[in-house]
Amino acid sequence: MATSLLLRHSSAVFFSQSSFFFTKNSSFRSFSSIKMERGEASEEKDAVKTTKKVFVAGATGQTGKRIVEQLLSRGFAVKAGVRDVEKAKTSFKDDPSLQIVRADVTEGPDKLAEAIGDDSQAVICATGFRPGFDIFTPWKVDNFGTVNLVDACRKQGVEKFVLISSILVNGAAMGQILNPAYIFLNLFGLTLVAKLQAEKYIRRSGINYTIVRPGGLKNDPPTGNVVMEPEDTLYEGSISRDLVAEVAVEALLQEESSFKVVEIVARAEAPKRSYKDLFASVKGQ
């Protein structure tokens, strides 16, 4: 299982361009609660159309693209942050609810704040470094890039931040320092360490966050049901990118997701549970 996770998650590291936010002094309003306040129809799609946009960083990655598609399918207005706008236009179907903007997380919070704009209510970060000769790339993207994004959110008053991270980011504290997946992934510029430091920054930011730590990422269609556990629990297992995207979207809709770190895999024998119950089962900060 550890070897399987290693191979699958190495693909995620290489290729995935892998609150709502509110400060702790303000009241939480999910998309669902906004709908109820406005007395609109019960359909979820009608509810989310009344809200501001969701900004997705890393929108053309294998996980980020799925997040964008699921957001659009559920009626969200989406602002897709990408490094190459023209190339990104070929990745998505024309949709009046989709806006594609240039955004590079390594360029600092000011430029990112301009890309996010004052019309984004939530941000989902699905960035991930691509392999190269620069051993500092994981830190530039997975650490400093995420920090830049958080600072940009604070500048714009974004209410919710969802980060796609990874299980085993805190593997040393879990006693998994000899886990082959933990060793392998950290060979690439201490990738997991970089992600963990970014998580810590998010947790100190005051923004309402949900940190999603998936197991080994698969491009195959979903199989099995989602298993959700507290941080530093899972050290093996895999999950479809489609389910990861689904969890990220649900983190915007479920108040129970606030200020939580959740770890997810899929298991055939796991019972089917609502996302409300899954998020509620994990203790928050």
Image (cartoon, rainbow, N blue to C red):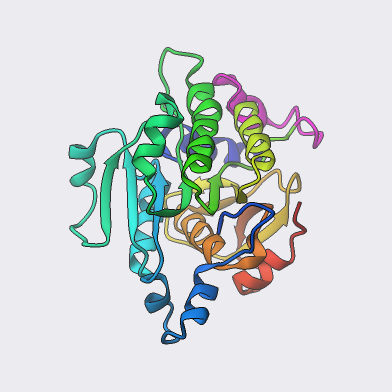
The residue lying toward the viewer, choosing from 154 and 261, is: 154
75 up-or-down from 77: above or below: below
9 up-or-down from 120: above or below: above
The residue lying toward the viewer, choosing from 211 and 12, is: 211
Residue 278 location (% of width, % of height): 67, 67
Decide if residue 163 is on the left or right side of residue 95.
right
- Is any atom of residue 61 visible in this view? no
Taking the spot 60% from the left edge, 69% from the top edge, the residue there is 275
| Quadrant assignment, res 45 | bottom left
The residue lying toward the viewer, choosing from 75 and 60, is: 75
Taking the spot 65% from the left edge, 35% from the top edge, the residue there is 201
| Quadrant assignment, res 48 | bottom left
Residue 73 location (% of width, % of height): 34, 67
| Residue range highlighted in magenta | 172-192
- Residue 18 counted in the magenta span: no
- Residue 189 counted in the magenta span: yes
- Is any atom of residue 78 visible in this view? yes
Taking the spot 45% from the left edge, 38% from the top edge, the residue there is 127
Residue 149 location (% of width, % of height): 49, 36
